Amino acid sequence: MSVMIAPSILSADFARLGDAVAAAERGGADFIHVDVMDGHFVPNITIGVPVVRSLKRIATVPLDVHLMIENADRYIDAFAEAGAGMISVHVEALTHVHRTVQAIKAHGVKAGVVINPGTPVVAISEIAGDVDFILVMSVNPGFGGQTFIPRSESKLREVRALLDAAGNAAPIEIDGGVDQHNIARVVAAGARIVVAGSAIYNTPDPERATRELKAAARGAAAVR
Ligand code: DX5
Ligand code: ZN
């Protein structure tokens, strides 16, 4: 599988989200990553269902909705109906992760499970056979622009081994602190969907930044 880029609009200008999405798409974005935060599971509040619904009207690529919220079960239907193409939920925030994954899939939406930097890979061992993707957090969730946690690289390899052992070819997504300097390493470690927020939107030319990150990622995948 080739590497795909998911620009995170968390670092974009929220007054011009349509422009932010269009620029990323011109640069070759494969998904638009939407960070939903509730001020409880993480110490920040961002956007919710109405914004996803509006983004769905203008985006030409699937919306990758990353739920950093408590009681995610309560909101799966709403985010699916708003137009999410992928929904990921944190294993740390769920009591019945298997049920939640099935609920996401029942909508025909790709289901992902996320693990935080402090969560061991074993936490997802029972669900590894059921997911459409795993998201490995390489920063503590809550804010864009944080520094990549180096241990995430070996964690990617551990998650790949777990998925392979479960007979699941599902891709691994990486999220947090990825930029031009480390993208080749995360791809070499097994990431196949790469989220980037500040490395795209905190630049003068998000279209170009998307294109360059994607080229670097694909170059790294090709030499493996
Ligand atoms: C962090 C979010 C990330 C964030 C990534 O909680 O889940 O998606 O936007 O931003 P960067 O790439 O700046 O770390
Ligand atoms: Zn995210």
Image: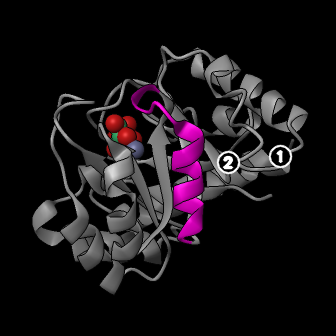
Q: Position of residue 95 (x, y in %)?
A: 46, 30
Count of numbered circles on the image: 2
Q: Please state which of residues 77 and 122 is positioned toward the viewer in this rendering.
A: 77
Q: Is residue 123 magenta?
A: no
Q: Which residue is mark 1?
A: 168
Q: Is residue 94 magenta?
A: yes
What amino acid type is highlighted by mark number 1? Asn
Q: What residue sits 31% from the left and 41% below the top?
A: 71
Query: Is tag 2's residue or tag 1's residue first in the polypeptide sequence?
Result: 2
Q: Is 11 positioned to the left or the right of 79 in the image? A: left
Question: SS of the residue at dot 1?
Answer: loop
Q: Residues within 10 Å of mark 1 (few under 14, many from 20)?
A: some
Q: What residue sits 39% from the left and 48% below the top?
A: 73
79 to 213, vertically: above or below: below
Q: Position of residue 122 (x, y in %)?
A: 68, 18
Q: Which residue is mark 2?
A: 131
28 to 193, vertically: above or below: below
First to last magenta residue range? 92-107
Q: Is 168 positioned to the left or the right of 182 in the image? A: right
154 to 22, vertically: above or below: above
- Kindly check if marks 2 and 1 are in contact, taking CB atoms under 8 A apart as contact: yes
